[in-house]
Image (tube, rainbow, N blue to C red):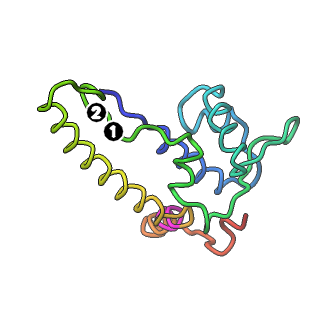
Amino acid sequence: MRRDSKLSGVLHVLLHMAEAPGPMTSEDLGRVMQTNPVVIRRIMAGLRDQQLVSSEKGHGGGWTLSCDFNAVTLRDIYEALGSPEIFAMGNRSESPGCLVEAAVNKALDGAFEDAEALLMARFEGVTLAALSKDFHEAMVKQGRRIDLGAVHEH
């Protein structure tokens, strides 16, 4: 079963953009993500619609962050992506004629709802700044120097 990795990919892109000294083109981001620039443009257009990124055309143009890393959460990004399905599992039939299947659906629906609520609460508790901080702490542990005061002032 193939997993939907769009959220993970977008978070990866946003963190790379935060490290860039200026705008990043779709081609630049495509190289970072090892994907076609057209895929990047499609994803970024949705984020632009939610005012998380902005774009400039022409020489020196590209994508830039237009959001506050301290305020934007994983849930915000998830919703900007259209709230993709979380679970690959589901009920065999949404309108069962069998009482056994109805009981199964009821149990599964409750479990799915609980799990989704927990995941959304976790997403709400993680900001882009927290992800960036984790990344920078890992960089420092590897002996790389980072100017934490100059990062993510968007």
Left-right relation of 124 to 93: right
Which residue is labeled 1 in the image?
87
38 in relation to 21, above or below? above
Check if residue 1 falls in the magenta segment.
Answer: no
Q: Count of labels shown? A: 2
For the stretch drawn in magenta, the main secondary structure is helix
- Which amino acid type corresponds to the residue marked 2 in the rendered image? Gly
Left-right relation of 85 to 16: left
Q: Secondary structure at mark 1?
A: loop
36 in relation to 72, above or below? above
Q: Circles 2 and 1: CB distance less than 8 Å?
A: yes
**Image x and y of residue 38, in percent:** 65, 25
Q: Secondary structure at mark 2?
A: loop
Please tell me which residue lies in front, 31 or 152: 152
**Image x and y of residue 95, in percent:** 29, 27
**Image x and y of residue 154, in percent:** 73, 63
Label 1: how many Cα within 10 Å (few below 14, some 14–19, many 20+): few
19 in relation to 93, above or below? below
Q: Which residue lies at the image location 70% right of the left edge and 37% below the top edge?
A: 45
Q: What separation in Å lies between label 2 and label 1 (alpha carbons)?
A: 7 Å
State which region is magenta: 130-135
Q: Which residue lies at the image location 33% right of the left edge and 39% below the top edge?
A: 87
Please tell me which residue lies in front, 149 or 119: 119
Q: Which residue lies at the image location 30% right of the left edge and 54% below the top edge?
A: 114
Figure quadrant of residue 26:
top right
Check if residue 131 falls in the magenta segment.
Answer: yes
Which residue is labeled 2 in the image?
90
